[in-house]
Amino acid sequence: MNSPVPPSSEQGTFVTDAALKRLKKRHAAESRFKLYGQLAIGIAIVALVTLLASIFMQASSAFTRHVLTFDTTLEASYVTPEGERDPEKIARNVSGFNLLLQDELSDQFLPEDPGLSLQRELYGLFTRLAVLPLARKTADTPSNIGTQQSFSVALADDIDLYLKGGITRRKAVNLGQAGAVSGSMDDGFNITLGKAEPLQSALDKFREDEATPTALIQIGSTWFRMTGLDGNTASLEYIAGTPQAPVSGADVSGLALEQAQDNRTVTDRQIAWTMLLEDEGRVKSVPNTTLFTNSDSTYPELAGTAAAIVGSLLTMLVCAMLAIPVGIFAAVYLEEFAVKNRVTDLIEVNINNLAAVPSIVFGLLGAAVFINFMGLPRSVPLVGGLVLGLLVLPTVIIASRAALKSVPPSIRTAALGVGASKTQAVFHHVLPLAAPGILTGSIIGMARALGETAPLLLIGMVAFVAEVPDSPTDESTVLPVLIYKWSTGAERAWEPQTAAAIIVLLVFLVLMNLIAIILRRRFERRW
Amino acid sequence: MLETFGHLPIAWLLFAVLAAAGFVSFFAGRTEAVAVGRGSSERLNSQPNYHGYFVAMATIGPAAIVLGLYALFGETLVRGELAGELPQRIRDLGSLELNQYIDRIAEQSAMRDAGPTGNALFDAATARYTSLLGISRIIAVFLALLAAWAGFFVAKRKLSVNFRARANVENGIKLLLFMCAAIAVFTTIGIVLSLFFEALRFFSRVPFFSFIFGLEWNAQTGADFGAIPLFFGTFMIAFLAMLVAAPIGLLSAIYLSEYASPRFRSIVKPILELLAGIPTVVYGFFALQFVAPLVRSTANWVNGLAFVPDGFLAAQPTSALAAGIVMGIMIIPFVSSLSDDVINAVPQTLRDGAYAMGATKSETVKQVVMPAALPGVIAALLLAVSRAIGETMIVVMAAGQRAQITPDPTADLTTITVQIVALLTGDTEFDSAKTLSAFALGFVLFIVTLIFNLIALRVVQKYREKYE
């Protein structure tokens, strides 16, 4: 529809200057209004893109992780201290395997008499339970004990995050060749750098952002902390690696860090050790399969979604068994059989309202009725499925009614005409024709149930579940609740982990919706 | 023997009994009908199969009722019986601890291969519980079989040449369908009753008016139950959400229905609806990780401006504004698709009339379409507000826990739903004022959203009729 424009050639009485001005104004208002609409749509789409992009960016680092590989002899003295070869005891012997790993590291990095704090710093590269897969593997093949084996162990979450570029900003710089060297291992060294300028500018840049930057210096396989930089002369203090005084002429490289070690969760030495291991090619990045194979854990690098995925599937199973048949039958009744009277009106109004009741209210219902009144156990998929089933019931009913409504009345009339009863007409003719629509609606309802969190919190599905549940009456958790729990974790490493779990959930949702769309495309009939 | 029965998984038992009874009676009924019709189904009023269905229905029905009753009340009876047999000193514990004790017994009994715990009394009680459970199951199955048998014979005697088996079966099916439709009503009744009675129990401890008008909320310590700060937080965040969702949702609906080409519409509409398909916990994470820090740094920047007094904005790590913005984004598709329906329902003749008078498109929208669609748009906004009030995960993750009244959107506020989650997560006892207060809050939430929904749905419906 085009707005009226006065013909320019013909100056009628109505076309005055004032009128033309008004018209211009009106057209400006018109395009402004149109712009507002475009802007609104633009904002909504930008919000969606930002949401997805921020989650994918967060998650990208969680799909790989860093492991340390090491070759060692599986000494029986570590693995089976009491000489037993009971697989179950070996699998539980976490402290023995820890000792094995720790001694392996100590041999490489620590001096004779390191002291407790230094040991703790080194052993902090791993969490205690990181050796658990190792223990399980050994328990499976006890014949390996006493032989040379190659293992890989997940690095602790903070180190992993550091290696992925988190924790603190940094800049690696080449400092040329060492000049004059003075000093000793105990008192520190002063060395003249080939070129100090890049380091100085990196540190200055960090200082601009009100940080307290620091620098680590690597000469060969020895790491120093820089305690001062005066012109070209740097004061160094030995921290890790081969205890060797710098020699003039050696290549010097530096690592400027935005935060000093008091302000971050990874110490200078831990960084130096990790870099040394990386130089040896023993620390490397591998695909994070833990995310799918492990259950929940208190350590982010060991936590996975396996138990929650199974819990979600079991909950969905119960939910579908309640909501889909009941929803379809209710829709058939309301659409095909109900006579219009007060009772059916009440049911109608009620279903429409129920669809708009906040989901958390269903959680309260579950807590009061299923758990308190009926005495069903907390935290189980059975109760979760029942609550979600009631929650999506109105959705399924409304979708099924729409599908039934779209079947033309001629089908019913024809069936009745050849002598079918009302029930036969509905069950033999209308329902099969409405089935694709009903199925699509049901899948969309299930997708909604899969993403639901709040009601499940109230029936105790937040419990820490370390084992994969295998029946609807086992304690379990579900994916969205796991996401909520992980998002409350204190360590930084939970953030990418949570984002990765969100992507797992989104993949499931996309799959369900794709199935619904394909079904609709494939079977939809226009009458 | 009894203990073996006590260990059997009961659900399978029920199904087995019902399925077996159904099969047997169907074939018995069918055979009977064929015999009555002397081998020819033409004589019969209904097909033999319908006679079979009828008998099966009459057999399974009563048995299912008996077993259903057992499933509901069986365990309670067993527990009552066990409680009566326990030694006096345990019975004197008080109902809460006694119940917990029996819970532990039931748990132990459910673990089939669990060995004795070493506590002689507990083990004896567990064994007794298991055998009582076995006895109750035997009785239940026996009663169910009896009911099935009675139903079977009554039904079988009814079979005759003129018996309208099909009509009877179809009535039974209709009854089943009606019951399914009624489940939705029972759910509502269940919600209302459970919330109402738990809320009543709460108000017997805390006066109603000090709950509704109290200014201090301190439920975790069980001290203060004044809900005004929660109501304030809830409406504040819903208001902020509507500030985002209402203009964006409405304007995009207008653009999509009045300006956009069909192609543009067919691409953009599903994209907007994607926003509605994202789980709320994902929005919560987005609010917590992305929007809340942004709000905080913006607030800090404002605080740093020369003309702004120090500490003008609270700039908390979680804030009402962050939750509100993200909630608004979540509600956009809700507002836009509802108002889209309403705008499309306005008859084309109204628009054509306006164009004929020389109005531009935007004038038509502003002066003709919107006034005509106004009641529907308001209803859509009301539904959106009710949705914002009841939304849980975003506020749980990004709004904070502090119950306070402040107009500063960068401060952390708490809402009704946040408190319900905080009060009912973890181990809960159903007897403390703390837990019960969650139900009182839930009751308020339910009533408020119900009123909003009722008004909105009524308006939407009336509006549809008007133009149809």
Image (spheres, grey):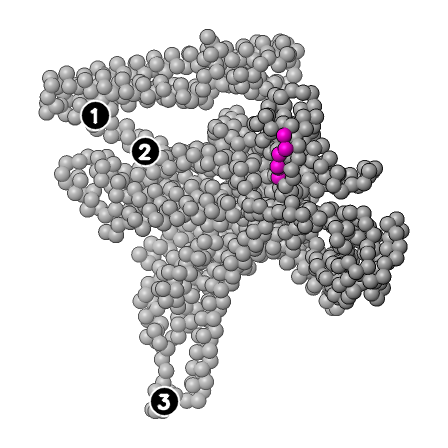
User: Which residue type carries mark 1?
Assistant: Tyr
User: Which residue type carries mark 2?
Assistant: Leu
Residue interval drawn in magenta:
A147-153
Which chain hosts label 3? Answer: A
As rendered, which of A25 and A113 lies closer to the eye?
A113
Mark 2 is surrounded, within 10 Å at the Cα level, by few (under 14), some (14 to 19) or many (20 or more) other residues, namely many
Q: Are marks 3 and 2 on the same chain?
A: no
Q: Which residue matches tag 1?
A: B50
Inspect the magenta stretch and tell me whether residue A443 lies in it: no
Q: Are marks 1 and 2 on the same chain?
A: yes
Inspect the magenta stretch and tell me whether residue A150 lies in it: yes
Q: Secondary structure at mark 3?
A: loop
Q: Which residue matches tag 2?
A: B177
Which chain hosts label 1? Answer: B
Which chain hosts label 2? Answer: B
Q: Is residue B24 left or right of residue A492?
A: left
Q: Which residue matches tag 3?
A: A8
Residue A60 image position (x, y, % from top left):
56, 51
As rendered, which of B203 and B60 lies closer to the eye?
B60
The quarter of the picture where the N terminus of chain A appears is: bottom left
Q: Secondary structure at mark 2?
A: helix
Identify the residue at image location x=28%, y=20%: B23
Q: CA distance from mark 3 to mark 2?
A: 70 Å
Residue A391 image position (x, y, % from top left):
45, 39
Q: CA distance from mark 3 to mark 1?
A: 83 Å
Prevailing secondary structure class for the magenta stretch in the rendered image? strand
Checking the image for residue B173, the label placed there is none
